Image (cartoon, helix red, strand yellow):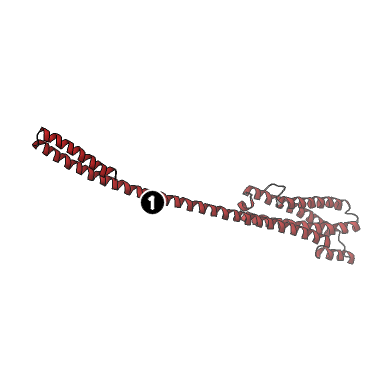
Amino acid sequence: MSSAQDPFYIVKEEIQESIDKLQSSFHQWERISCDMGDQVHLTKDLLAACESIEWQVDELDKAISVAGRDPSWYGIDEAELEKRRRWTSTARNQVGNVKKAVVAGREVNISGTASVSGMRRELMRMPNSQQADKSNQYTQDNDDFIQSESDRQLLLIKQQDEELDELSITIGRFGGVGLTIHEELLAQEKIIDDLGMEMDSTSNRLDFVQKKVAMVMKKASAKGQLMMILFLVVLFIILFVLVFLT
């Protein structure tokens, strides 16, 4: 997944813009620290911005922790996870430093008047509507990030199931081909055995005939031998036809 499409980098860019605005407001707060009215108003805005950014960084940290359980599902590695953790840590430190400086400056310049006490109570209450709107926006971004990763996991699981089904079908086909080859080999082996038995039987018959011929030729005259030879040739042809052509 490219940086432009990764929800982390989209949220990171928005948080970084908020941090840049926070630091710009903090430098302005330092310059007007002597003006009590402007300082009270800007202090309130700075603390609210700090709370909002800290919440956003915490939510981003939770998303990183979820991805860290199984980085391969999210298409990232340990080096990328460590890079993201370092960035959130740096962002949290930047916001924390601004918050500490603002709180310290507020405590130094705070007076015991009712107006100042009211301002302090206001800072300790829930964030203003603008902060709540930002928080809701980043909550939605984080939910979208988690939902997109969940959809991606479901798609990967579906693809793996389809690949396993195709592999199972292929293995079944190979098994059927192997069984067919085995049956053909058994049939051919039987044919070869039958042919061998017929060859042995024919060989025994020829040996028997040759012995008979030899005995007759010893006893018969020249004419008788000629007739016997003709008779044996005819007999041999008949046997040949019976054995090899039927």
Q: Quarter-wise, where is residue 96 in the image?
A: bottom right
Around disc 1, counting alpha carbons within 10 Å, would you say few (fewer than 14), some (14 to 19), or many (20 or more)?
few
Q: Is residue 109 above or below residue 79?
A: below
* Tag 1 residue: 183
Residue found 18% across the figure and 38% down from its top: 232
Q: Nearer the viewer, residue 209 or 1?
A: 209
User: Does 41 appear above or below 229?
Assistant: below
* Badge 1 amino acid: Glu
Dividing the picture into quadrants, the one containing residue 154 is bottom right
Relative to 76, 240 lies left or right = left
Q: Is residue 58 visible?
A: no
Q: Taking 220 as reference, is 12 left or right?
A: right
- Residue for point 20% across, 37% down: 233
Question: How many numbered marks are there?
Answer: 1
x and y percentages locating residue 124 in the rendered image: 81, 64
- Measuring from the top left, give residue 113's x and y in whole percent: 89, 65
Q: Secondary structure at mark 1?
A: helix
The picture places residue 69, in percent across and down from the top left corner, at: 61, 56
Residue 65 at x, y percent in the picture: 65, 56
- The quarter of the rendered structure image containing the C terminus is top left
Note whether residue 57 is visible. Answer: yes
Give me the residue at 80% from left, 60% from top: 133
Say which of 160 and 24 sits in front: 160
Q: Nearer the viewer, residue 97 or 238?
A: 238
Residue for point 68% across, 50% down: 84
Choose between 87 and 39: the one closer to the eye.
87
The residue furthest top is 222
